[in-house]
Image (cartoon, coloured by chain):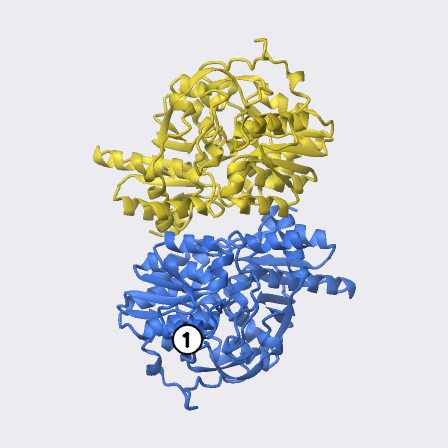
Chain colours: A blue, B yellow
Amino acid sequence: MPLEETTITLPKAEIPRTWYNVLPDLPEPLEPYLTPDGKPVRPEMLSAIFPTSLIEQELSPQRHFDIPEAVVEALSRWRPTPLTRAAALEKALGVRSKIWFKNESGSPSGSHKSNTAMAQAYYNKKAGIKRLATETGAGQWGTALSIAGRAFGLDVRVYMVRISLVQKPGRKTVMNLMGAEVISSPSDLTEAGRKAKAADPDNLGSLGLAISEAVEDAAGRSDTNYSLGSVLNHVLLHQTVIGQEIKKQLAAAGVSPDYLIGCHGGGSNFGGMAVPFVPEIKDGARITLIAAEPESCPSLTRGKFTHDYGDVAGLTPLLPMYTLGKDFQPPAIHAGGLRYHGASPIVSSLVKSGMVKPEAIGGPELFRFASLFARTEYIIPAPESAHALAAACMKALELEQAGKPGNIVFVLSGHGLLDLAAYEDFINTY
Amino acid sequence: MPLEETTITLPKAEIPRTWYNVLPDLPEPLEPYLTPDGKPVRPEMLSAIFPTSLIEQELSPQRHFDIPEAVVEALSRWRPTPLTRAAALEKALGVRSKIWFKNESGSPSGSHKSNTAMAQAYYNKKAGIKRLATETGAGQWGTALSIAGRAFGLDVRVYMVRISLVQKPGRKTVMNLMGAEVISSPSDLTEAGRKAKAADPDNLGSLGLAISEAVEDAAGRSDTNYSLGSVLNHVLLHQTVIGQEIKKQLAAAGVSPDYLIGCHGGGSNFGGMAVPFVPEIKDGARITLIAAEPESCPSLTRGKFTHDYGDVAGLTPLLPMYTLGKDFQPPAIHAGGLRYHGASPIVSSLVKSGMVKPEAIGGPELFRFASLFARTEYIIPAPESAHALAAACMKALELEQAGKPGNIVFVLSGHGLLDLAAYEDFINTY
């Protein structure tokens, strides 16, 4: 089939101009964030580490936020991103379902993380901040914030989960090349890091621990703010450009989606894809939202819905979310971006009210589908994105067996060119 | 400035439908290829390793070749490629010249090599061939042919220059993932490889030696052909999609180019960019064509124009070209794709007749400009492409000093995400 029909691109003029805030449209209102003594967090309590503008976005009932012109300009370096029909993958699977993927891998960082990184850097710069501290798991968020810091003139320090640094040294090179400082976490630079190392000198690190280090760093310096790549409401808000574009693209292709699938770690790419569809699902649209998380870190499918800290040291507010407990030590899987004990409060709320279906994905199938995608679509998926891809393939096969082909859309949140050790392991094992 | 004005994209319908053959338009006719006894090579002599269709393209006086529909379809997965104004780079350099880059890094292999790989796989498949043998320096060509083999149903064996395999193990992973076999060269599988290892067990390999191994492999099996990623006329022919698209894009932007710059190893990306402009240059257009080669492997600037073998073992015909001698052992620079003793006969002819200006580029400036590009345009260039980029930056600075800004176009032949060791070395050294 001609490629015009398989790749839906949008002109630059169609970049979304507003972010969509799902808070007023959630089936159940979001429970408040809590302080350790159980009282609701007041906005000003967050101002030691976030600019006022982002705190406002975090807690606002306002349905739409204008995207600042400078952020639109930054996003327009790579957005709108293509929505592509994976026709060769469908053929290889032998399914009649149509599989589309929203390709976020063409961004400066190679993943969807750049969408919120640019916005966060912009607002921090505007607030007079000179320096950002953050954590990174797989390295995608750290890369995105390093580039965004460069774009808006901010210094960036990244606490990178130790096991990820070992698995993908190239990520550090990229961040250094962009001018950022990269610290192996747990480090000796923070109380949280020193404590973790004292308890276990071989600590491989985790996202939750790296968050503690970055928050402690930011809280201790007035010129520094903290920047988070997932979980929080304002991060999902910035990622709604993904879902908004998908809507336009599906409409242009005349396609009604049956399944929308994203991988889930902290929830930002899944949420950014899914929440713009919430109003129409509430109005009766038959769309199934699937959050694909790793079997080995199953917050949504095996976690408990409660208030829990977002980090290991307990420096963040208590968030209403599905969690495996802040002390859960995830195994050293290659999908470092999904090694998180908790989940986005918004996604948790949608799971709790039944609007999002979580699925745990794992085993050799994961990389088998990822390899099939690489061999048919010629793009190597990030191990994180492979979870969404595998869920999409399994859904297509299931629908085929049931004789009911449908329209499946998944987010390819990033490419895996800096995650090749994962594929090398797979090739050597199977 | 709005991005509409800085990135010129073409619709899928504008993919070139013919390849342009410069042979009839060269200022001086190309000298014949010779056998070891000094007689002109007859087409049938090449049929042990190439299909008839490609031999015809190699030696034909025909000005245009239709691109087969299946190849157009394969190319349309990523073509036309964007022509982007490097406005942020210009600003960082402080120049008034406009710098545009033709971005070939978005192809399945991450480089321009996919353009000819798809064509060569198509013609070999059509000729009933089951298996292709080839060499790779940096790994870009091997990756491209692995994917093309997958696309058209051919097995692929890649002899990879040993030093490149050590420098970038990720390249092997990608080729394996695509189903290709990767052999470290020199190997024990060929006479040429065994001889080289006997002479020097620590031989780091070279493109010329890996070519010998692949040619020997292909010549010895009737189901196998040889496939070359550069140098030869039919390879440059397939790469003319680059120059043809640039022409259309510059016309769409209303820009008259003053300088067209490509990096030069075997000559395929440079030639593919440059030759479509030869007719108008002959008609008086004031366009300077610059071939940027590495100081450490300076075939065009320091080599001798003569007939020489394309490989170390002397298995190829003698080609009329600039050469450092087939036994030249290039140093282990990171730009593995440029470590070649010879040059394309077409580019050599254009250099000899004064239509192409070669420039040797090297030293820390190379990666300094590459890093500047990464920090401003958010794309990490392949070390090969960095030569073109550095030449473009130096030209812009030179024009600035002379008070005569102009329009500079260079080809970003590939991204450097699988070449990060080169950047890591640079960061640690400077």
For residue A134, above or below residue A26: above
Relative to A359, residue B327 above or below: above
Frontmost residue, B364 versus A192: A192
Image-quadrant location for residue A136: bottom left
> Which quarter of the picture shows residue A133?
bottom left
- Expressed as whole percent of the image width and height from the top left, the position of residue B94 reads 25, 44
The answer to whether residue A107 is seen in the rendering is no
Type of amino acid under label 1: Lys
- Please give left or right for residue A202 compared with residue A289 in the image: left
Count the marks. 1
Q: Chain of mark 1?
A: A
Question: Residue A336's x, y, as percent?
Answer: 52, 64
Going by the image, does B157 lie left or right of B5? right
Residue B174 seen: yes
Nearer to us in this view, B340 or A188: A188
Q: Which residue is mark 1?
A: A195
Give the class, few, some or many, for how many residues have Cα within 10 Å of label 1's Cα (few <14, many ≥20).
some
Where is residue A70? Give x, y as percent. 34, 60
Is residue B55 depicted above or below B370 in this figure?
A: above
Q: Is residue A86 left or right of residue A193?
A: right
Left or right: A159 with respect to B239?
Answer: left
Pick the front one: B251 or A226: A226
Front-most of residues A355 and A25: A355
In percent of width and height, residue B152 lies at 68, 39
Which quadrant is the C terminus of chain A positioned in?
A: bottom right
